Amino acid sequence: MGDTVTIIDIPVLLERIESLQSFVLTTHVHPDGDALGSEAALYHFLRREGKNVRVINADAVPANLAFLESNGLFETWNPAAHERELMQADAIICLDFNQPDRVRGMEPVMRASTAFRIVIDHHLHPKPFADIYLSRTEASSTAEIVYDILTAAEFPVDRATATALYVGIMTDTGSFRFERTTPRLHRIVAELMETGLDPMAIHRMVFDDYAIGRTMLLGRILAGIEQHCDGRASILVVTGEMLSETGTTVEDVENIVNYGLAIRDVELTALLMETAEGWKISFRSRGNVAVNDIAAEFGGGGHRLASGARVDGEELSVLKQRLIQRFCRALAR
Ligand SMILES: [Mn+2]
């Protein structure tokens, strides 16, 4: 256990679930719509199967996703209250991440637990820490994989479960526009909608319910946008000062990087955000250049069209210059 990645398919997963009784579901820090939607949907399924289920996450649910909550479904990690749960569960199911440090403070207990560890995820390059991996890198979202699990188990998806899956798919596909938004995915979404869920209300709750500071922050970031490499690349910068002056947090910066690509001729963009641990860089590509290769050169990684890196101890102007040079080189090929 622990040095290889054993990829399994849905029937093996369902057999395993059937044989176990108590489950802890968990997801990555800064949980997003896919993380929480996948957890909620799987929770409803496991409960109907008569299992004992707890959902325990390293971080709290952000306000815009609180509507996924019902009856204290999501618990925030508190060692005094949860260590036993993690140690004694039959299984820990890790949703929407494949590297153990993504649960941060929970990692030591998750590793020490004798529970059977299951990963359900769609990210590249799973790290060996779990017993089995339902890993589908071609999936749009973890929620899409959970949908397939529930369908294979002939679980009658109700509106609450459908809403959770819809949120996961909608957020991870940038509202049905990113790569992997396939005809099949739209058919899944159509089926979810048959339960009577309200797409307009869901979209509004997730994306149009910010405090005014977030829109002011957006204005500050966009006002400073730079275009480079004959107009084919753009750079966005978020400083700690911009966050504090608008009363926002790093969470509010989510998705703003996509504005960098919403410019004619721009093929590559990066958003540089100042954090307590240095600069966090988000890369996006329109398609011709793989940004995970570039991210790797800055010590990060990710997907071909969306990836990230963290750089510590570098002056903004120096880092920006390095980035621009790298972008122009990639675009010159
Ligand atoms: Mn995801």
Image (cartoon, helix red, strand yellow):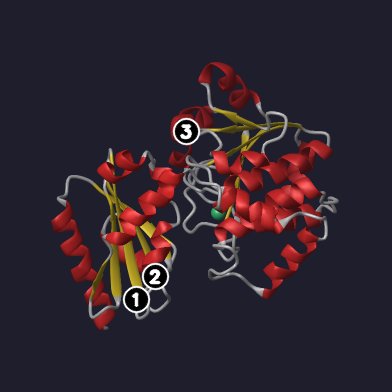
Locate residue 253, reporting x and y percent: 40, 50
Of the two numbered discs 3 and 1 on the same chain, state the one appearing first in sequence. 3
> Height in image: 75 above or below 35?
above
Locate residue 301, reporting x and y percent: 37, 58
Name the mark on residue 261: 2
Locate residue 128, reporting x and y percent: 49, 46
Label 3 – label 2 distance at C-alpha: 35 Å
Residue at horizontal 44 percent and vertical 30 percent from the top = 105
Residue identifier under label 3: 107
Can residue 204 be seen here? The reply is: yes
Residue identifier under label 1: 266
> Height in image: 8 above or below 258?
above
**Mark 2 secondary-structure assignment:** helix
Taking depth in this image into account, of 73 and 215 the one nearest to the observer is: 215
Taking depth in this image into account, of 279 and 209 the one nearest to the observer is: 209
Q: Is mark 1 within 8 Å of ligand 1?
A: no
Taking depth in this image into account, of 220 and 34 the one nearest to the observer is: 220
Label 2 – label 1 distance at C-alpha: 6 Å
The kind of residue tagged 1 is Val
Q: Residues within 10 Å of mark 3 (few under 14, many from 20)?
A: some
Locate residue 100, reporting x and y percent: 47, 41
Q: Is mark 3 within 8 Å of ligand 1?
A: no
> Height in image: 296 above or below 325?
above
Please count the marks in the image: 3
Ligand 1: give its quadrant. Answer: bottom right
Residue at horizontal 24 percent and vertical 82 percent from the top = 332
